[in-house]
Amino acid sequence: MRVALCPGSFDPPTNGHIDVIERAARHFDRVIAAVIANPSKEPLFPLETRKDLLADALGHVDNASVESFDGLLVDFANERKVSIIVKGLRAVSDYEYELQMAQMNAALTHGLDTLFLPSQPEWSFLSSSLVKQVSKYGGAVDGLVPTNVAQALKDRFASS
């Protein structure tokens, strides 16, 4: 069985994230969307909320599941016997960072490869950071994030 990991903080999940996972799911028997706890960042949503939002948004993708991890991605991949990481790239600036990460992961675990999927043009500008900023100031993010995520953002910032 060919299994791939699509890691990220998914804070919050965007339509760009969903697109990359859907596309990966067409090429692999199973895709695990791996939500990182990432203690170095202060997320808008707690880990369990991010997992739930992503799982709900991926409910239509039969061969995708959502898990979370803390620590090194290579350890998470090794525990699940996964040898492919799929990462979406929006721009050249993403590539520089992601290439370094891919090379580090490969150095830490021989045989762990990273596959880069360029974003679809309609999502190439989209980032979780921008979505949070727009939503925080009352802007509409419908069409940029799954419906459940748009509602969660409205609810989160209504209480701020």
Image (cartoon, rainbow, N blue to C red):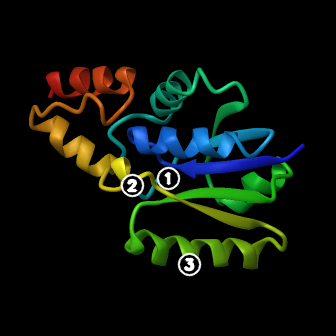
Name the residue carrying label 1: 38
The kind of residue tagged 2 is Lys
Which of the two labelled residues, at mark 1 and mark 3, occupies the earlier sequence position? Answer: 1
The kind of residue tagged 3 is Gln
Q: Do tag 1 and tag 2 residues touch (Cβ < 8 Å)? A: yes
Kind of element beneath mark 3:
helix
Q: Report the residue at 41% width, 61% height from top.
A: 90
Viewer-closest of 125 and 102: 125
| Viewport quadrant of the C terminus | top left
The kind of residue tagged 1 is Asn
Kind of element beneath mark 2:
loop
Tally the marks. Answer: 3
The local crowd at label 2, few if under 14, some if 14 to 19, many if 20 or more residues have their Cα within 10 Å, is few
Distance from the alpha carbon under mark 1 to that under mark 3: 18 Å
Name the residue carrying label 3: 100
Name the residue carrying label 2: 41
The local crowd at label 3, few if under 14, some if 14 to 19, many if 20 or more residues have their Cα within 10 Å, is few
* 146 w.r.t. 12: above or below: above
